[in-house]
Amino acid sequence: MKSIFNKVTGALLAVSAWAGSAAFTAAHAVGDLPGGPSVNQLNLHPAVTKIAEEQAWLHWFMLILCTVIFVAVFAVMFYSIWKHRKSAGHKAANFHESVTVEIIWTIVPFIIVILMALPATKVVVAMKDTTNADLTIKVTGMQWKWGYDYLKGEGEGIGFISALDSTQRAMSDNGGPKKGEVVDDYLLKVDRPLVVPVNQKIRVILTANDVIHSFMVPSFGVKQDAIPGFVRDTWFRAEKVGDYYGQCVELCGKEHAYMPIHVKVVSAQDYSRWVGDEQKKLAAKADDPAKVWTAQDITQRGEKVYAANCAACHQANGKGAGPIKPLDGAAVVLDADKSQQIAVLLNGQNNGTMPSWKQLSDTDIAAVITFTKNNWSNKTGQLVQPAEVAAARK
């Protein structure tokens, strides 16, 4: 059945491509971007995951089925109107309801709906199955960039911010590409892409720390909203090495157009090499856990750590939201026994509702705890040093 639809799809695309080439001129100073948009693109992005392939097949299946139904129904209707028109001598008939007709036009649409629902349900269920992931990455949307934190699997502990490349931002500020200049990845180039291994299941956990954003990579068949105070997830398994692009597709503010997504899919060997390089960089930047910080310095650092990692759920005012407990006035924060709050950040609690943040450095954990203990109405005066966190890890 799929082969028939593929042939029909190919024919439709050929006609569409011819029509598109006739309708648009060759004056566009852009070319196709592999893994991204194409010039005069009339179809979905080429799929590199099974889910995206199924979505594309469903798209054409539904389109063709609806087109056939439309043509059949209107053909019968117009034929009946023309064949039994008054000018041809026909008179309107008087008749009452027909049980047979009622049964037919109830059963036939029911069968059609089932034919549409079964394959669609199968794909939707598969899209929601994030179990048995090889790699788990937390994606945080923020105005106007993306935060990537590798939580589980090879590369655990790596984290960085990905933003629009500065050269493209400057280009946009100056009115865009110059006349005749070819920039295929305009407003899609980032300073640091998300790197993942090929043929591995990648679970993506999404949230946001300000407004609603939406993470979408068309070639993967992935789109999931990132909502402040909520944690949602999706997944993909890229089957082809390459660069794939997407954007935030939820209107999130004046620089919404400046939130590109670039996912770099590499071989397992290249991924391991990248992880090794990133871990060396992290180690080089790592703080000395034996350093004794002043209250002012560590609180200032804690404010930045809180904004980047905690404010999405606990809010900037520390009041929490919904099932998320507030930190302002929380007993564990006010308690003189600092080890309790350290344990919560290292191990999590409430069956993962509060996740473990052990991927943060000892200094970052000490800083954010110190910040919460001395911010809002929490004026405890307590100070946590990195050495205390390091000792609690053992």
Image (spheres, rainbow, N blue to C red):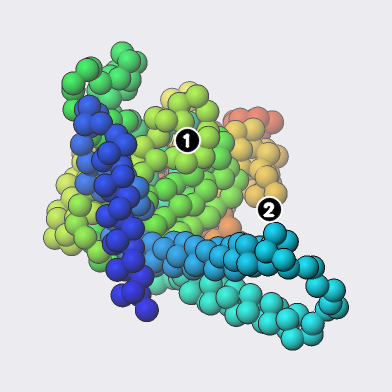
Q: Is residue 323 left or right of residue 272?
A: right
Q: Nearer the viewer, residue 296 or 59?
A: 59
Tell me where residue 20 appears, x and y as whole percent: 30, 42
Residue shown at the point (21%, 31%) measured from the top left: 26
Q: Nearer the viewer, residue 215 or 336?
A: 215
Tell me which corner region of the image, top left, top right, bottom left or bottom right, holds residue 46. Answer: bottom left
Reading the image, the residue beneath label 2 is 323
Q: CA distance from mark 1 to mark 2?
A: 22 Å
**Circle 2 SS class:** loop
Tell me where residue 13 appears, x and y as whole percent: 31, 55
Residue shown at the point (22%, 46%) measured from the top left: 34
Residue 142 disc label: 1
Residue shown at the point (45%, 65%) measured from the top left: 64
Tell me which corner region of the image, top left, top right, bottom left or bottom right, holds residue 21. Answer: top left
Q: Quadrant of the C terminus?
A: bottom left
Residue shown at the point (84%, 77%) measured from the top left: 95
Decide: few, some or many residues near mark 1? Use Cα within 10 Å; few <14, some 14-19, many ≥20: many
Q: Nearer the viewer, residue 307 or 172?
A: 172
Q: Is residue 89 left or right of residue 234?
A: right
Q: Amino acid at mark 2?
A: Pro
Q: Amino acid at mark 1?
A: Met
